[in-house]
Image (spheres, rainbow, N blue to C red):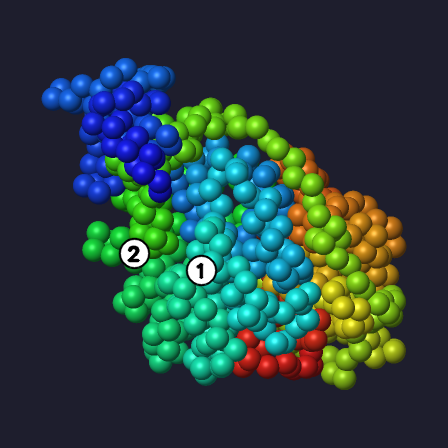
Amino acid sequence: MEMAELKGLIDAASGRIPSDLCIKNCKIVDVFNKEVFESEVYVYRGRFVGFGNSSKTFPEALKTVDAHGMYMAPGFIDCHLHIESSHVSPPEYSRLVIPCGTTTVVADPHEICNVCGLDGMDYMLDSSEGLPLSVFLQFPSCVPATPFENSGAVLLASSIEKRIKHPRVLGLGELMNYVGVHNADSDVLDKMLVAINNGKVIDGHAPLIKASVLDAYSVGGILTDHECATGDELKDKLRHGMYVLLRQGTVCHDLLNLLEGVNERNQERCLFCTDDCQAKTILDRGHIDNNVRMAVEAGMDPIVAISIATLNASNCYNLKDRGAIAPGRRADFVLFEDLKDIRPVEVYTNGNHVASHGKYLAEVKPFPVPKAVMGRMNVKGLTKERFDLKLKSNRVNTIKIIPGSVVTEKNVVDVNIDENGCWMRNSEDVVKIAVVERHHGTGNVGLALYEGFGLKGGAVATSVGHDSHNITVAGDNSEDMYAACQELIRLGGGMAVAKGGKILCSVEHEIAGLMADKSGREVADELTEIQEVARRELGIREEVDPFMTLCFMSLPVIPDIKITDCGLFDVIEYKFIPVEA
């Protein structure tokens, strides 16, 4: 901060010069005292500078807004998310979430970096510069996510050093390799030390870990975890000095379960996040405002819920310039009418009016997509026969879906085998699932069996496949699986539905095979259509999101069992296993 800026703020706060903005007739949510008080609020150069009261008279502001008795709260902060999971670019993401009252996000560009490396990191930084939404990034810690699959890049500690000092890079992204931390793997520790020695935050990803493994994980300074599933697990992570994120996204719905462990004594160590949230989910349900409403509806004090969405987040991530309505803090705020049903009416960032009644008011500036992140499809040697699953036994391991969760179950079932020794569809709800490597032309195709999807007579495929984002395809015949994959190669990425050897529907994701250069509404409509086609034509179950669920089946860091381009992987045993039981 320069002398002139500091002097201007003090002069405005002292009433010697007029403020830029005054909000009158508002009820201010005080996240420090956990109470509501009535006052005028003054803003100068994008920061709050004071409250009006009977003993202090400010000169008339350049602009005055009448809140008509509405509540004023700090802008909401999403503490962990992947913009790529919305399927839109960062500028479009801003247009989606700002009307929901989200004014700051801590994003992990883990997905695009696993495809494009530093080119992906630079694209996310450049395309999110100067938006009404404050976009902070965490440098991905796991590229590749594990050594058990092929991703598009390898980012080591030396790569992190190149970007960690950027003012919008807060630290190291979710450290999924908790085994590497526990075993003191030198490559993992090198990455952690880059963050530690630069005074940056390290985010966690630690599902179900406890005892000595959790001790080792937290002693390294890993500060957060968004993978808790129960109230007891939440308390254990808090006991280890971590912040716990109450997640509510498109597929992962942990918030209500975790509320069982939240109380007035520990709520200051709780945060909200969406993690993976599609554009349609945001348009239909909201964003962090949805987390707040759900918590309040479940019995949480509304001011506590707002504090979790604001002040707690700013404290965790050292964003001390925001998260509260107080002099000196950034003027990011929302106005809403009902404290028990919080739905943002007006949204301001940096003192600017950026959304009203759900409409985005800021200018949408197009950002040309650089060639370095376009398409990224390098598939070699793919034929229809690569999807034939040969078996030595009819008793097999399956990846069984748990609806509403990215966690899977390892199950054992009996299947049919044809005269060529290949899997053949029977009455069981079991289909094939494959992961096709798309980054280096290795020709790898991992094959396994998938239970609980409900698919019949076709195939669905996606180039969004956490975390390495190879092509993931599920189907009950090789011809349709091949056709769906070929369509994605042609498009440069996206999603496809095939039946009878023909493409019924497809969606293009030209940005790294992960995002579309379209509006959030267009993307939401396209995803809705392809999901409806998948359900109507292939019988995929209503309780299962056809593509969001599929893309997590290649995530070999979340229990119990997953599939990569290298084969079927048992996350609990931490090793590859045969399809045969």
- What quarter of the picture does the C terminus occupy? bottom right
Mark 1 nearby-residue class (10 Å; few <14, some 14–19, many ≥20): many
**Residue 250, x across and y down, in percent:** 54, 49
Which element carries disc 1, helix, strand or loop?
Answer: strand
- What quarter of the picture does the N terminus occupy? top left
Give the camera-side residue of 201 and 176.
201
Mark 2 nearby-residue class (10 Å; few <14, some 14–19, many ≥20): some
**Residue 526, x across and y down, in percent:** 70, 39
Quadrant of the rendered image containing residue 458? bottom right
Residue 457 sits above or below residue 197 on the image: above
Amino acid carrying mark 2 in the image: Arg
Q: Is residue 14 left or right of residue 131?
A: left
Which residue is pictured at 49% across the width and 35% down the height?
Answer: 132
Q: Nearer the viewer, mark 2 or mark 1?
A: 1
The circle on residue 171 is 1
**Label tally:** 2
Amino acid carrying mark 1 in the image: Gly
Calculate the distance from the C-alpha at mark 2 to the C-alpha at mark 1.
19 Å
Which residue is pictured at 51% across the width and 65% down the height?
Answer: 161
